[in-house]
Image (spheres, helix red, strand yellow):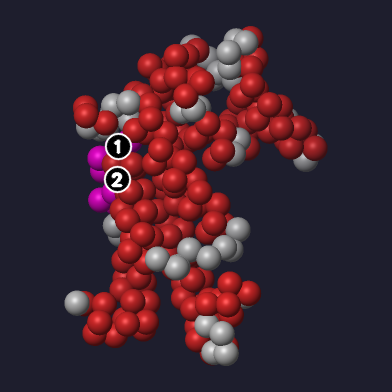
Amino acid sequence: MRPYFDRYPGDEKKAIKHYENNIQLAESLEPVLSVFEVTLRNALIRELERMTGTKEWYIHFQSNKKLKTLFKYITIAINHITARGETVTADKINGELTMGFWVSLFNAEYEKFLWKDLRRAFPNLPKLKRQRKTVSAPLNTIRSLRNRVYHNEAISWNLTRLSYLHDMIVEVIGWMSPTLPIWLSRVDRYKRVSLKVKWQWYGWRFLV
């Protein structure tokens, strides 16, 4: 609560209300973040399997010295699975890997080895944007927002920026599947919640 009390010194009621609004906004972003994460993971798994010719695509990371630094994520995933007493399978490893891993596949140091194949995960990416850095930048921005939401941090200081990020996520999902944003609109409550919060904060002023 400290950031909210600092923002509204002497007005505890307003600070708590802003905190409540932050929770509402974070909750409303869950559908779009969830769909983004699952879609990205599945699209990358598909291309990694195609690239390596096996469901156990991660084995190639261990044998390629240029990609070996990424294998630490695989090792951590395997350790988590075995610690739970479960059998290690490709599907279990895929599900255990973090968003940080999937996004790191687009780091500049791996461009020469991965980008040519992984760009196929974004079949609807406009030609002018078909560059590794054009994909990597929004993925990292979305990952940062995701972490703030899931770690209960403040995301509501700038609602204009937050709406921009929401729309960015929907756009990136569309790069991977043109139909998903249409389906997502049925469960995506962000714009309604954001409108309600803006009205509570600014009243008629937010329309100007």
**Residue stretch in magenta:** 175-183
Quarter in which the N terminus is drawn: bottom right
Where is mark 1, residue-wise? Answer: 175
Q: Secondary structure at mark 1?
A: helix
Quarter in which the C terminus is drawn: bottom left
Mark 1 surroundings: few (<14), some (14-19) or many (≥20) residues within 10 A: some
Q: Residue at x 60, y 58 (%)?
A: 151
Residue 181: say if magenta. yes
Closer to the camera in the image, 3 or 31 = 3
Magenta-drawn stretch, dominant element (helix, strand or loop): helix
Q: Are marks 1 and 2 in contact (CB under 8 Å)?
A: yes
Q: Would you identify the image quadrant in which residue 46 lies?
A: top left
Marks 1 and 2, Cα distance to the nearest angstrom?
Answer: 6 Å
Closer to the camera in the image, 207 or 188 = 207
Residue 65: x %, y % from top left:
62, 10
- Using the image, determine if residue 108 lies above or below residue 187: above
Where is mark 2, residue-wise? Answer: 171
Residue 177: say if magenta. yes
Residue 33: x %, y % from top left:
44, 51
Q: Would you identify the image quadrant in which residue 173 lies?
A: top left
Mark 2 surroundings: few (<14), some (14-19) or many (≥20) residues within 10 A: some
